[in-house]
Image (cartoon, rainbow, N blue to C red):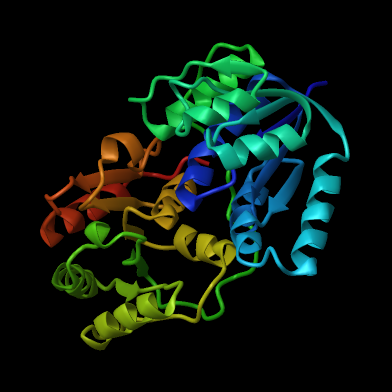
Amino acid sequence: MPRILFVKTSSLGDVVHHCPAVSDAARQMPGATIDWVVEEAFADVAAMHRSVRRVIPVALRRWRGSLWRPAAWREFGAFRRALGAERYDFVIDSQGLIKSALLAWLARGERHGPDRHSAREPLAARFYERRHAVPRALHAVERNRRLAAAALGYALDGGCDYGLSARGKAPPAPPPHPYAVLLTMTSRADKLWPEERWTELARALAARGVRAVLPWGSALERARCERLAHMLEGAQVPARMDIAQLARLMRGAYGVVGVDTGLAHLAAALGAPTVGVFCGSDPALTGLYGSPRARNLGAPGRPPAAAEVLAALEAVSLVEAVS
């Protein structure tokens, strides 16, 4: 049976978008062994996939800031040994960056990746033995699926299956029921939704008996969540959670509303009713994708109104989950 190694390291949204390609490979090649190289911060997502045998965490982000420390080089040596522990029939880099291409180059096996016209960094294509053309205008999920299909030699069929389950520790404190998870944080200021629209949405949900839960990941995000919660009766700002805990939290929610952030993509991939709020990015390329319980609203420079988001959330919450 073939042994497959996928290299998709970051970011969280990119890792989630790669999951359907893993599902395709497992369905098209029954009995295949599938391993995955991923940044340590997102290893929980790869581990949630039902068809991944071994997750090989890498810590490039952390190592870059401590190259002078012997501990970082020891960790890198341990990573190289884990990566070289076996030979693969296919090593597929779907990231298309120089850093991910170098990681694929360290693995033992025939290296596949996007060609120079398809890769995010064209120079990365020089490190692959087999290069594949992937249209750049497609959604990220479909780009990953097409690359894997070309590398592994099968025709795509079937729908988009993320293959994820919300395993792991429960959230540290049980939220009120029913509850909605509001993901207010994102990496770019132009992706933020105005705070007054968050409060308008949360108050409308509270009037329907649904309390707001506002998770966070940094001190700045926590301050924003606490500022919003102060204006909302019954809103909860929980202790910081890891990805596995957040997955459990979102899977049990009445619904999830999030700006363009990896956690919103994870919520949709897990089958939670999810509305993506887009203010500074194009949902056609990186929006919530492949779930009947997900909706995208807004566009660059055109953030949606709170009433639109509420109506969309109520609509997707009525769609039955597919087990």
Can residue 163 be seen?
A: no
Toward the front, the furthest residue is: 68
Residue 26, x across and y down, in percent: 67, 27
Image-based side of 101 in relation to 71, left or right: left
- The residue sitting at 20% across, 47% down in the picture is 297
Q: Could you say which is closer to the camera, residue 94 or residue 256? A: 94
Give the tally of numbered discs. 0
Quadrant, the N terminus: top right
Q: Residue at x 35, y 59 (%)?
A: 256
Q: Nearer the viewer, residue 235 or 128?
A: 128
In the displayed structure, 36 sits above or below 3; it is below
> Could you say which is closer to the camera, residue 253 or residue 263?
263
Horizontal side, residue 52 vs residue 87: left or right: left
- Residue 208 location (% of width, % of height): 22, 70
Percent x, y of residue 322: 47, 40
Q: Is residue 99 visible?
A: yes
Q: Quadrant of residue 220?
A: bottom left
Name which residue lies at 34% across and 83% down.
223
In the drawing, does residue 228 fall left or right of residue 119?
left
Task: Classify residue 180 as left or right of residue 29.
Answer: left
Identify whether 145 is placed above or below 49.
above
Residue 21 pos. (x, y %): 56, 30
Quarter of image, res 93 = top right
